[in-house]
Every structure is written in C-alpha cells, then in structure tokens.
Image (spheres, helix red, strand yellow):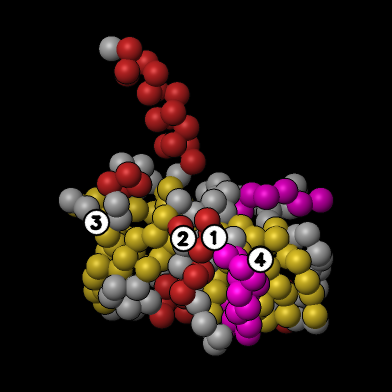
Amino acid sequence: MNFNVFTGLVEGMAVVVGIAPEGTAVRLTIELPPELCDDAKLGDSICLNGCCLTVVAIDGRKLSFEAGAETLAKTNLGQLKPGDRLNVERSLPVDGRLGGHVVQGHVEGTARVAAIRKEGEWVTMQFTLPDALLRFVVPKGSIAIDGVSLTVVDVVGTTFGVMLIPHTLEATTLGQRNVGDPVNIETDILARYVERLLTPYLESQ
C-alpha cells in the first residue's frame, strides 16, 4: 500500500522519450532505469523533478503521465524535450523510512540557478526565488529542489544557497544544471502550516 508522500531522496534518473500535446495538457513519456521498473502500476503516484504525477500507461520500462496546464505553468516540466533527464522517486510505502523530509510533490513554483561555485568535489549552488516563496526558506531548514531534499545553507536578499555533495551531483539532475536554469521548488510544508495558523491571529492584532 502506497500513499502520496515522498522523502526527497531521488531513486534514479529517467529519460524523456516522448512529449505529446493533448489540448492544454501534454502526455509525458519517460523510460525508467531497470531497477525502478519492477513494481510500477497504473495509477501509481511518482515524483518527477519534484512533481507528483499519476501513471496512465505502461509499456515495458516506458511510463506515461498527463501534465495539465497548471502543472506546466508552475514547473519546469513544460520545458522538457526528448533526451532530457528527470529525477524520479516513487511514493513512500507505509512501512518505509523517512530519510529526507516530508515532500508532497506539490511544486509551488520555480527558482533560477543564480551561481555555481565549486569547492573541491562539493558545489555551492545559489538560487533566486520570488518573495512569495522565499519567506518560507530559512537557514538550516529543508527544501525540495527538483524533488531533491536539501538543507538550506543561507538566505541573502532574494537568493538562497545549498551545498551539494558528490553523490547528489552524480545521482540527480542538479549536477547538470547551469546558471539561469529553472528548477522546481517545494518549500517545507511545516512552515506553510505555521503561517496559515498564525495569519488570523496576526491580522487581529
């Protein structure tokens, strides 16, 4: 039994093999690595670059999904082309270990890569983010970037930074990102709940 919660621990990278317009939506077809194909079923929820989508067709290692206009507008999925790679995470089983942080797969918007600085085998990456989302980002807090659970190093002005270890650079699409590239962002759900609960109290003051 699965439910639609993810951890931000990417299991592998898939390759885009097809993009077909369907009115204002698109049908996205990917090819999974062999190790992620053993239990895929129709109706499964799978996180692609941090965006939770439903499997609508299966053909061997090829899985198809439908992405609507809202998804295309708020994520980087609308800019994909055949041959691009995507971060993949299957939903967390009930008895699974939460190794990252609670990720819903509900992308709130995109950030842009502002700077990339190498420090030995590690990389510091800075991102620009609109104020509406930046207010939920705090140093040492959690954030999902293209579905990858990361810890925020700092927040300066309109940017925030993260440190990427060699494994993350090799195992996810973040190692292929360049300055100016858009990335999908999901801020910490706990911060959003706190704001929601406090807003009526603060407005009454």
23 in magenta? yes
Q: Secondary structure at mark 1?
A: helix
Q: Position of residue 35 (x, y in %)?
A: 72, 77
Q: Locate residue 164: give its quadrant.
A: bottom left
Q: Secondary structure at mark 3?
A: strand
110 in magenta? no
**Circle 4 crowding by C-alpha within 10 Å: few under 14, some 14–19, many from 20:** many
Q: Secondary structure at mark 4?
A: strand
According to the image, label 3 marks what residue?
Answer: 159
Tell me the CA gap for discs 3 and 4: 32 Å
Q: Secondary structure at mark 2?
A: helix
Residue contact between numbered discs 2 and 1, judged by CB atoms under 8 Å: yes
- Residue beneath the point at 66% across and 77% down: 29
- Residue beneath the point at 30% across and 68% down: 113
According to the image, label 1 marks what residue?
Answer: 69
Quadrant that contains the C terminus: top left
Q: Locate residue 41: give its quadrant.
A: bottom right
